[in-house]
Amino acid sequence: MSITYKLELGAPVAPSAVVSALTEGAAGIAEAHTGTKGSLRGGGWFDVDVAEYDPPDPVEQEFGFAPTVEVYFGLSKSGDFEAQETDVLRLVLAVLARIPGDALLHFEHDEVWLLRRGGRLTVNGALWKPQQLALLSPPYETAPLAFG
């Protein structure tokens, strides 16, 4: 069993391009991959797929864009949780640096970690630890983010 975070992208991009951004953008975190699935150091995993549009979509309703690609990140409950969480943030930032468009990172439609909408990056300052905020390059803003 794992704890799963989800990155939803609203961009005209193929899952294979997202996998490339993941594996090339944060060297050493993604240990291996086959197709659109892979393993992460620390015991986690990732899975990239085309988002299935099923209205009403909560991301579209709350944040104004329809996801086209989704990335699931599973964190091992037996590993160093904070290190794995930070690795996921590094991977997400690598994807955002390489793939334009809207994006939302959340945990089970409950905790919203970041939103990129119209080129503006907003992070939920209540969730990011100082060492994780240090991974960000300006410009970005901090604000509360949540599903309705």
Image (cartoon, rainbow, N blue to C red):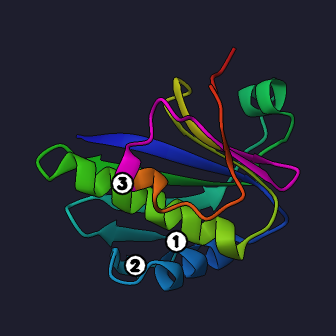
Residue type at mark 1: give it.
Thr
Distance CA(mark 3)–CA(mark 2) = 27 Å
Instruction: Answer above or below: position of 82 versus 36.
Output: above
Counting from the top left corner in percent of width and height, residue 34 is at 42, 79
Distance CA(mark 1)–CA(mark 2) = 7 Å
Residue type at mark 3: give it.
Gln
Counting from the top left corner in percent of width and height, residue 107 is at 48, 34
Residue 33 shows which numbered tag? Answer: 2
Instruction: Answer above or below: position of 39 versus 120.
Output: below
Closer to viewer: mark 3 or mark 2: 3
**Side of 135 where 44 appears, left or right:** left
Q: SS of the residue at dot 1? A: loop
Q: Residue at x 36, y 56 (%)?
A: 86
Q: Residue at x 52, y 23 (%)?
A: 110
Residue type at mark 2: give it.
His
Instruction: Answer above or below: position of 34 versus 94.
Output: below
Crowding at mark 1 (Cα within 10 Å: few <14, some 14-19, many 20+) = some
Instruction: Answer above or below: position of 72 versus 92.
Output: above
Closer to viewer: mark 3 or mark 1: 3
**Residue at mark 3:** 131
**Residue at mark 1:** 36
* Discs 3, 2 touching: Cβ within 8 Å: no
Counting from the top left corner in percent of width and height, residue 10 is at 79, 53
Specify which label sits upstream in the sequence, 3 or 2.
2
Residues drawn in magenta: 115-131
Distance CA(mark 3)–CA(mark 1) = 29 Å
Q: Residue at x 38, y 71 (%)?
A: 38
